[in-house]
């Protein structure tokens, strides 16, 4: 929905920040990368990008509906308003993963343990760095993209959407608006129908007294 390469790039920027903490904690606790680690990285990618998308969407919401202008005040307000939801999301997921991280050598946890370690490390780094990096990058490079996004959202969708279907004539060229042929008036049509017929001639009517 953003239609901006800069905003998309900023969203993708949070992925390396999440991978940094995930790989660091994996190196400390697991020591190797396995298929389970890759699965955890894929899951972590969705969590990290979602947080950035929600924060940038809130910036645009403040500018469009709350009357805020692009600047440091708007970015600070948006970041503080998203601080509690982002922190609670990461804290809830992290608390659910702690029992799996503590049960490293229990039977049946050979696959769940690396996944939990990767996600937990990525949540820590992405949450802390996202709250610092995303506002700074958006404030520095996001002015033009934010203005374009607001202009696009305020535009009437019926006027902005191009015509998907055009009428074509038999030779394949676009045809203009077609009008129905004009219908003549009923009286005029009757007169035109009988215009070519000869006029009726008078017929003499003979009376009985005319015969001898």
Image (cartoon, rainbow, N blue to C red):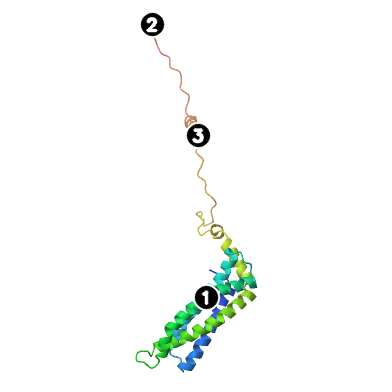
Query: Quick one: label 2 or label 3, which is nearer the N terminus?
Result: 3
Judged from the image, the secondary structure of the residue bearing numbered disc 1 is helix
Q: 93 and 185: which one is in front?
A: 93
Residue beneath label 2, please?
A: 209
Q: Vertical placement of 156 versus 133: above or below?
A: above
Q: CA distance from mark 3 to mark 1?
A: 75 Å
Judged from the image, the secondary structure of the residue bearing numbered disc 2 is helix
- Where residue 62 sits in the image (x, y, percent)? 58, 67
Residue beneath label 3, please?
A: 185
Residue beneath label 1, please?
A: 84
Q: Residue at x 42, y 89 (%)?
A: 101
Residue 3 appears anywhere in the view: no
For disc 3, the neighbor class at 10 Å (few under 14, some 14 to 19, many from 20) is few
For disc 2, the neighbor class at 10 Å (few under 14, some 14 to 19, many from 20) is few
Q: Quadrant of residue 202?
A: top left
- Horizontal arrangement in the rendering, residue 136 relative to residue 38 (left or right): right
Q: Are marks 3 and 1 in contact (CB under 8 Å)?
A: no
Front disc: 2 or 1 = 1
Q: Vertical placement of 78 versus 100: above or below?
A: above
- Where residue 180 sits in the image (x, y, percent)? 50, 44
Query: Quick one: label 3 or label 1, which is nearer the N terminus?
Result: 1
Q: Quadrant of residue 204?
A: top left
- Where residue 184 sits in the image (x, y, percent)? 50, 36
Q: Residue at x 55, y 72 (%)?
A: 81
Residue 82 appears anywhere in the view: yes
Q: 128 and 200: which one is in front?
A: 128
């Amino acid at each position: 929905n953003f239609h901006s390469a800069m905003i998309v790039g900023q969203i993708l920027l949070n992925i390396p920040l999440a991978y940094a903490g995930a790989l660091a904690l994996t190196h400390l606790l697991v020591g190797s990368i396995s298929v389970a680690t890759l699965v955890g990285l894929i899951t972590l990618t969705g969590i990290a990008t979602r947080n950035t998308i929600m924060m940038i969407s809130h910036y645009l919401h403040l500018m469009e509906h709350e009357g805020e202008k692009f600047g440091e005040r708007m970015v600070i307000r948006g970041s503080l308003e998203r601080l509690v939801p982002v922190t609670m999301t990461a804290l809830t997921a992290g608390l659910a993963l702690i029992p799996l991280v503590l049960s490293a050598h229990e039977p049946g946890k050979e696959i769940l343990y690396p996944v939990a370690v990767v996600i937990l490390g990525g949540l820590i780094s992405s949450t802390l760095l996202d709250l610092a990096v995303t506002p700074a990058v958006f404030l520095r490079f996001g002015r033009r993209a934010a203005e374009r996004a607001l202009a696009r959202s305020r535009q009437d969708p019926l006027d902005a959407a191009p015509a998907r279907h055009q009428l074509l004539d038999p030779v394949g060229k676009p045809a203009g608006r077609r009008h129905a042929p004009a219908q003549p008036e009923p009286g005029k049509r009757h007169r035109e129908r009988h215009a070519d017929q000869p006029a009726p001639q008078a017929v003499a009517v003979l009376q009985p007294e005319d015969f001898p």
